[in-house]
Image (tube, rainbow, N blue to C red):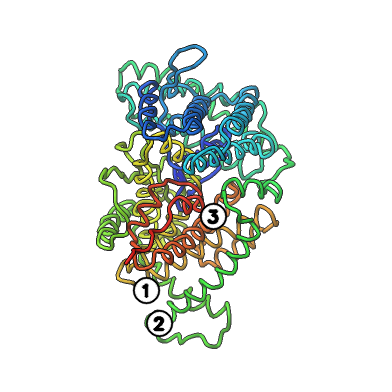
Amino acid sequence: MRSSSLVPKMLPMNPRVRMAACRTPAVAAALLVIFGVAAGAARLATEGAPHRASLAASDKTMPANSASQKFAALSDQFMKDSLARSPTSASFAGYHKHLDAKTGQTVELDALLDDMSLPAMAELRAFYARWRERFRTETPPASLDPQDAADWQVIDDQIGLSLLEFDKIQSYRHHPTVVVELIGSAIFLPLTQNYAPKDVRVGHVLSRIRQVPRLLDQVKAYLADADPVFVQTAIDENAGNIDLIQTTVAGEIAPGSPLQAQYDQVAPPAIAALKSFSQWLASDLGKRPSRLTWRLGKELYDQKFKLVMETPDTPEEVLASAEHDLRAVRAEMLEIALPMHAKIYPEHGDHSDLAGRERENRIIGEVLEKVSAEHPRRDQLQAAIEADLASITQFIREKKIVSLSSRQNLKVIPTPPFMRGTYSVAGFQSAPPLEPQAEAQYWVTPIDPKMPEEKAESKLREYNNFTLKWLSIHEALPGHYIQYEHLNSLQPERRRLLRSLYANGAYVEGWAEYIAQVMMDEGFLGNDPRFRLMMRKIRLRVLANAILDVRMQTMGMTDAEVMELMTRDAFQTQAEADGKLLRAKLTSAQLPTYYVGLREWLAFRKRYQAAAGKDFDLMKFHDAVLDQGPLPVPVVEKLVPPPAPATR
């Protein structure tokens, strides 16, 4: 998952951070929608005037079209003003200094913590409404060239998503996870970036820690009607915030330094406020009856689905297609599993005494049970992933699947503790669009040493040696990491910035699933049937994601029915199914992005390849579509026509 990217999709938080396989993602997305920058991975690296000069210079290559020039200026101003209204989102984007047009002063955004008071939220809602009207009246899409028109539509959809959040969904009023994840991200981000010397960045962190009690008091004034799942998750994640201050931040400060004196002053009140907030959640908010549940309901879900996917597909169409494909993929798995089963279990026969689903489940399940036993030790998860990246990279080069990055800036690190409720397995965070040389991070969530052995074994069997290879293909190469490395070379810079911040989730997640299919089709691991079987199992997971999201959010699907779908139909382990059930309650319209995007990528590739004929070049196709950045796939198809047939 972009990752989504650290920020799931809140008109700033793919995935992204680009959310990962189990990240994928969530509740923080509500935060980003609220604050207006849907970031797939983005961290806007910019420093006031130099950034503005850079954008202006990069736009000199544009045609002298007054509408395009005006749109360039407006979109640049809108993005920066949006980020300035949420300092945490600005840190996600890497936007560190903001010139206040009213005062003429430069604001250090990394030292500020968001204002989530009701007056501030009302003004933010009005801000988006004003900007939507400006874009629609001053730069209508019909007046723009195809590239700017594509950007216009992305902005309009993302403003629409934010207004839907403010007017109807209102996660910030009902999901305490929003403020908890905001605080963790606000503290963590400056520690991982390199926009200033370390002592300056730690000083910014301490400034934000000082403001934690104020922010918690603001949200306590109106948090209400919270489903228990959001209350308990907020309590769990808030423990990570306390540990972040007590352990991680404290570990960055030299004993006896001026920063130590500042830490000793601001940390105790913040920790006390966080502990008090958790107690309030448990003994007050969590005890109140709630008129709302985690289910979004059909009306709101349909509206959100359209704005998130940015395609004509309806939830009902996606559901019907996913349920059809689930049956087809199970049939493929049986075909792969039968010869493996005969070799592994010759004494079992082919279970011809069983029929239909029961026979499929027995044969496929027994083979999966054997293959899943091949997994790393519980303390070797990250080491196994790091080792896999080398062989994956070599295969990509040999098969000429896509151009790789020359920056080699990917670092594998443990998932930050406060994000492990959302990223239970892995996640990805790209380098900032305006600092492409900066570090990109592949997060791997370690297995908690306190986790019982039985539960840890279940998780390791789900993420066995073959599934871990898929995970690295999806999250890193040639998935999200390569995807965002191509984006980080896009010109002009303002377009790169915009498409990073407003990344289309179906494009992002669909690419990662599509390119994993390409790797399998090209013979990765020598067409090992164990890998191919696990790839089909992962496809079942993608399909189940779409099915359960639509049915849970709009059709009253029960926990028992969800577990039946995941464990019996999609062969997921109990640990994986438990985590997915929780994630599906904490998020909405994110889990289907994998399947919606996969369908779009496969259909686009098929049409393009048919039109190109013998001139089709796999690497050139992949480079061309990735170089557009994460727009909706149907829009990319319009911008990347197949090559004209060669004349004889």
According to the picture, the residue beneath numbered tag 2 turns out to be 339
Q: Residue furthest front?
A: 648
- Name which residue type carries label 1: Pro
Which of the labelled discs sits on residue 580, or is there none? 3
Closer-to-camera residue (65/587): 65
Task: Check disc 3 and report its element: helix, strand or loop.
Answer: helix
Q: Is residue 384 left or right of residue 42?
A: left
- Name which residue type carries label 3: Lys
Q: Quadrant of the C terminus?
A: bottom left
Which percent across, then down, holds residue 38?
Answer: 51, 39
Which of the labelled discs sits on residue 529, or is there none? 1
- Report, in whole angstroms, how far the alpha carbon at label 3 lies from the one at label 2: 31 Å
Q: Residue at x 61, y 31 (%)?
A: 137
The residue carrying pointer 2 sits among few (fewer than 14), some (14 to 19) or many (20 or more) residues within 10 Å by Cα, namely some
- Report, in whole angstroms, how far the alpha carbon at label 1 lies from the one at label 3: 26 Å
Tell me if label 2 and label 1 are in contact, CB under 8 Å.
yes
The residue carrying pointer 1 sits among few (fewer than 14), some (14 to 19) or many (20 or more) residues within 10 Å by Cα, namely some
Closer-to-camera residue (244/320): 320
Identify the mark nearer the N-term, 1 or 3. Answer: 1
- Name which residue type carries label 2: Pro
